Every structure is written in C-alpha cells, then in structure tokens.
C-alpha cells in the first residue's frame, strides 16, 4: 500500500514540477510512460503563496499519506493532505519566502526524507546542514556543516534517504563519500 501511495504521489510531484516549469502540461503528464500509475491531479502553480512553488527539488510522503515538498527558492517546506489540500508551510517567518540561518529556517532546501516515526529531515545547500522536524514542522535538531573536507561536516548536502533501520544517508556535493548519520 505504501509503495502505491508513493507511486501516485511521485507522478503527482512530477506533474507539479513540469507544470510549474512549463516543460510539460498536465494533460501530457496524464499520458506518462508509467502505465501502472493512476494520475490523481496536479496541485499548485508557480509563485510564493500557499500551495505555490518556486524551484521544487524533492518531496516525501509520511505514513498518513501527507506530501512534504522542498520549495527551494521560497526557502520553505510545504505540507499537503493526501487529497492535495494545502495544510501548512514552515521556514523563516512562517515560510513567507525569506531565507534564514536560524533553527527552522532555510536557505535553499534541496532534499527531504521522512523516517519511520514521521520525522521530517531537510538538507540545505546554502546553510550546509540537515535539520530534523516533527510532522507539524516543529524544529527538533540539526547536523551542521560548512565548506571544507572535515569528515564530520556536511559540504553541500543535496539528497537524503533512510533505510529500513532508520539509518540516514546524505548525498553531498563535492568529492566526499556519502556519510551515514
């Protein structure tokens, strides 16, 4: 069941990305080359309002089917219900589009993943860190980074994923190996 939800949200996410960038219309997304998926609907548009996006980079789905989107150039995370209804956003000043460096603030969030407890993890290229939140966007903690090659620091964290034991893996820019946290 979870795999099917992921597949549906993945198709939804792809249609949102292409519709917002103008690369693909919603009608073309429905005729995708992925025949085993059911198109649900597209959500959002370009912009900075609730449910609008400016440079999407990643999405993740929690155990309840909620969709979380890393809205990179709006420097925020947006959360949607399983039916696509906008629920909330978070980042600096409530996710109003301004970048920030404090706890719960973002500078170009690029990666997003959810662990088995529905904690949300976000990678940021601009702040060289990974932040952890609960499913409502409340800050829990962070792993800091910085430019350089120190083994215990992130250098442009890009993507993030969890394995079945909740081990977190972060993909970084540069020449460092993928660290396991």
Image (tube, rainbow, N blue to C red):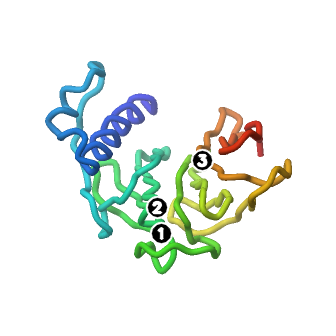
**Viewer-proximal residue among 178 and 80:** 178
Q: Residue furthest bottom?
A: 93
**Which numbered marker is on residue 73?**
none
Q: Secondary structure at mark 3?
A: strand
Mark 1–mark 2 distance (CA, rounded to whole Å)? 5 Å
What residue is shown with label 3?
158
Q: Residue at x 41, y 45 (%)?
A: 65
Q: Residue at x 42, y 35 (%)?
A: 6
Residue 131: give x, y in percent of width and height.
Answer: 64, 60
Between disc 3 and disc 2, whose residue precedes? 2
**Viewer-proximal residue among 166 and 172:** 172
Q: Residue furthest left?
A: 27
Picture layout, residue 131 above or below residue 92: above
Classed neighbour count for the residue bearing mark 2: other residues with Cα under 10 Å, few (<14), some (14–19), many (≥20)? many
Q: Quadrant of residue 134?
A: bottom right
Mark 3–mark 1 distance (CA, rounded to whole Å)? 19 Å
Residue 37: give x, y in percent of width and height.
Answer: 29, 25
Classed neighbour count for the residue bearing mark 1: other residues with Cα under 10 Å, few (<14), some (14–19), many (≥20)? many
Q: Is residue 115 left or right of residue 84?
A: right
Mark 3–mark 2 distance (CA, rounded to whole Å)? 15 Å
Between disc 3 and disc 1, whose residue precedes? 1
Q: Residue at x 14, y 36 (%)?
A: 27
Numbered disc total: 3
Q: Quadrant of residue 3?
A: top left
CB atoms of marks 1 and 2 within 8 Å: yes
Picture layout, residue 92 above or below residue 64: below
What residue is shown with label 1?
90
What residue is shown with label 2?
77
Q: Residue at x 24, y 57 (%)?
A: 45
Q: Is residue 121 left or right of residue 144?
A: left
Q: Secondary structure at mark 1?
A: strand
């Amino acid at each position: 069941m979870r795999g099917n939800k992921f597949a549906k949200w993945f198709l939804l996410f792809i249609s949102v990305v292409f519709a917002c960038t103008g690369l693909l219309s919603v009608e073309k997304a429905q005729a995708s080359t992925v025949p085993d998926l059911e198109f649900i609907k597209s959500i959002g548009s370009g912009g900075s309002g609730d449910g609008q996006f400016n440079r999407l980079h990643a999405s993740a789905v929690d155990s309840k089917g909620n969709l979380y989107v890393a809205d990179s150039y709006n420097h925020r995370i947006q959360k949607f219900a399983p039916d696509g209804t906008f629920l909330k956003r978070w980042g600096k000043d409530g996710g109003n589009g301004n970048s920030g460096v404090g706890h719960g603030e973002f500078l170009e969030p690029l990666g997003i993943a959810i662990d088995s407890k529905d904690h949300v993890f976000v990678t940021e290229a601009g702040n060289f860190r990974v932040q952890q939140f609960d499913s409502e966007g409340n800050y829990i903690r962070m792993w800091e980074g910085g430019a350089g090659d120190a083994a215990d620091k992130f250098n442009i964290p890009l993507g993030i994923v969890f394995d079945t034991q909740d081990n977190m893996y972060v993909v970084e820019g540069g020449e460092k190996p993928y660290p396991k946290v």
